[in-house]
Image: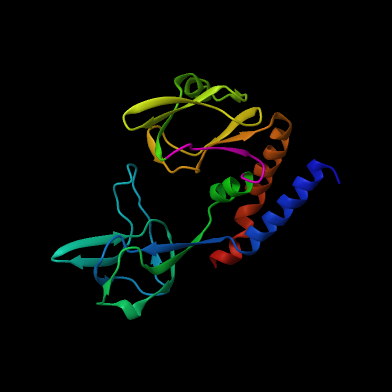
Amino acid sequence: MDMQQDIEVNLEELLMKYRENPFEEIPVLTPHTGLINFKVKKGDDVKGVEGQWNHIPGTLLFIIDREKNTKKITSPTKGKISAIKTNLEGSFIEAGEQVMIIKKLLEKKEVIERVLTTVLHPFNAKDDARYYMIPELTNKMESGKNVAINNGDEAIIMSLMKRDTIIKYEGVSGVIYSVYFGQGELVEKGKPLLGICPMEKLSLIEKIIERINLEWDNALVCHRA
């Protein structure tokens, strides 16, 4: 079996996995200490941030009161409460404690992104810092064309401690297929900034996306019921 066939077999197994269980479990942690008061129960549907400017908060999940300082915690995503520690109601809890889990049905775009991680080569953040795409690459990507990148090319500006450093790309040559950060966004060390696709895999990626676009909505009918 050649490399191309091996990739296609792995992708078939991955797609089958997502079809059978197209969900993501998102733990909800307490941001600080205090007395907790739950506002949802197990089985409740919740909404995430909405609005053109993300100005509408998600469903209120719980309130933490600490020395008359009240903090409202809202849902980060759309989904269903699949687990909740109701035994903690009214108790004093520590920061960072998991108090519930939201089960989220993955959207088509999210499935595509996850599947593509098996094909794309990641270029990761060097440090906890704010990152910017260099203007030259930004302008090329806005044209809508494939933007080639080679090992050693200047790609990213890292802003750390009020100092900007140009970061050169390290990795296989290809095209910039995915950008995982927004201009000026704070990114943790080791998190991916770019997803690079070797030229010879472009046709494979197009087939993957086409297939998911054709199949995914029908595959989820039973899970939405």
Residue 133, image x, y percentages: 46, 27
**131 displayed left or right of 197:** left
Q: Nearer the viewer, residue 87 or 45?
A: 87
Q: Is residue 114 left or right of residue 162?
A: right
Please state the extent of the stretch shown in magenta in the rendering: 117-127
In the picture, the quarter occupied by the C terminus is bottom right
Instruction: Return the x and y of residue 223 as percentages of the image width and height.
Output: 57, 65
- Residue at 40% of width from left, 75% of height from top? 42
* Displayed quadrant of residue 117: top right
Q: Is residue 26 above or below residue 139?
A: below
**Going by the picture, which residue comes out furthest to the right?**
1
Taking the spot 63% from the left edge, 48% from the top edge, the residue there is 115
Task: Please identify the residue farthest to the top as the structure is shown.
Answer: 136
Main secondary-structure element of the magenta-colored stretch: loop
Q: How is the image coloured?
A: rainbow
Does the segment drawn in magenta span residue 34?
no
Residue 160 location, x and y as percent?
A: 36, 33
